[in-house]
Amino acid sequence: MRLFIAIELPSEVKAALEKIGKDMRSSKAVPRENLHITLKFLGDLPDERVPGIITALSDVKFNPFSIKLERAGAFPSERNAKVIWISAGPEAPLAAVKAQVDKALPRYKDDHPFKSHITLIRTEGDDLRDEIAKMNAKLEKKEILVTKITLYKSTLTPNGPVYEKLT
């Protein structure tokens, strides 16, 4: 099963994000129910590993903290956008939680440095600088209270991934 660890977003934040991404050309919006901040992607793992992962994640402790939506951007760049994201920050408390997750699950390595973001839209590598600037003008800098992390199962379907909370 495909697993990842993430911060769930409140419904009002998801609604605001869905609203600003609606008018993007040549894009595939991430469904509202799938919006989240990924801390760690674990990959495809056998079912029997799940109880150990859940136990390890119980060692991740932090005081609740607030972050805010900050700005829209793109991977790999706004000139060649394949993923439109919304950053959330400040990044320091998120990075601290991410470090605890990494310590709790040392056998699962990341293939890229951590950048706190919410994947909003997938595109075809277009130059979307103007659209991203418009998104930034419309972005409501909603606050997110982070109180827990969640282990998700991701099932790939022809209509896109379906996420299920395991914790």
Image: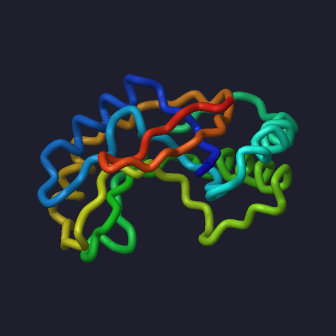
| Residue 41, percent from left and from top | 62, 56
Q: Number of labelled discs?
A: 0
Q: In front: 137, or 19?
A: 19
- The residue that appears at 60% across and 42% down in the rendered structure is 6
Compared with residue 1, is residue 133 higher up or lower down, i.e. above or below? below
In the displayed structure image, the side of residue 39 where residue 78 appears, left or right? left
In the picture, the quarter occupied by the C terminus is top right
- The residue that appears at 67% across and 66% down in the rendered structure is 110
- Structure colour scheme: rainbow
- The residue that appears at 27% across and 50% down in the rendered structure is 136
- The residue that appears at 13% across and 46% down in the rendered structure is 23
Q: In front: 150, or 114?
A: 150
| Residue 43, percent from left and from top | 62, 58
In the displayed structure image, the side of residue 22 where residue 110 appears, left or right? right
In the displayed structure image, the side of residue 21 where residue 167 appears, left or right? right
| Residue 54, percent from left and from top | 79, 37
- Res 14 quadrant in image: top left
Q: In front: 30, or 90?
A: 30
